[in-house]
Image: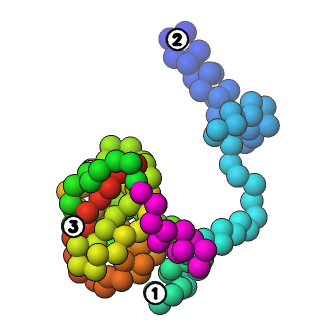
Amino acid sequence: MKQVILLSAVCLAVTGCAGVDMNNILPSPPHLQRAPAGPTVNPDVPPADATTVDEFDTASEGDKVAALASTPTPAGALGTTVANLGDPTVPGFWVETPLVSSEVNGRVQSKTTGRTVKVTLKPTTTGGSRISISALQLLDLDLSGLHELVVFGS
């Protein structure tokens, strides 16, 4: 009986703490703290109401020129993959492919057009590959469909 009364008293005492903001008493570690409220603007991210290819392709002309610059990559071909359009809201020049196990710089070449683009190669666990809208545009490939690409690592 004493145990039941003691347990009930502890439960009542703890429920009284529900209205206390524990963050002011014990602040959370820096990696768990929330970002300050307010608008944050990332110029590379397409607007939320984007509907056209040009609105989704946020790469600047300078970025496009740099991606097309043909500098030799020391590593050879990692393999060939078939890719389709990835998430159009993710900016930049990238390819998600199972041919890499960690994020590395590289390039891809279209077997159809022969054009080459520098990209960031990102690992994926799926069998297929996805490519950014900006990279597809520079490879002069259609946004819909599957495209055979040769992947080169750095």
In the figure, 65 relative to 50: above or below?
Answer: above
Q: Which residues are magenta?
A: 61-72
How far apart are labels 2 and 1 at the CA level? 69 Å
Between 16 and 27, the residue placed more toward the observer is 27
Q: Residue at x 68, y 33 (%)?
A: 29
In the figure, 46 relative to 52: above or below?
Answer: above
Give the mark nearer the N terminus: 2 vs 1.
2
Q: Residue at x 53, y 85 (%)?
A: 55
- Return the x and y of residue 143 as percentages of the image width and height: 33, 83
Which amino acid, mark 3? Val
Between 76 and 35, the residue placed more toward the observer is 76
- Return the x and y of residue 94 as percentages of the image width and height: 42, 63
In the figure, 69 relative to 113: above or below?
Answer: above
Q: Residues within 10 Å of mark 2 (few under 14, many from 20)?
A: few
Q: For marks 3 and 1, give the one nearer the viewer.
A: 3
Is-magenta flag for residue 65? yes
Q: Residues within 10 Å of mark 1 (few under 14, many from 20)?
A: few
Q: Residue at x 51, y 17 (%)?
A: 4
Q: Are marks 2 and 1 in contact (CB under 8 Å)?
A: no
Is-magenta flag for residue 133? no
Q: Which mark is residue 53?
A: 1
Which amino acid, mark 1? Val
What SS does tag 2 mark? helix
Give the mark nearer the N terminus: 3 vs 1.
1
Which residue, given by chain and number where applicable, does mark 3 sit on? 82
Which amino acid, mark 2? Gln
Q: For marks 2 and 3, give the one nearer the viewer.
A: 3
What SS does tag 3 mark? strand
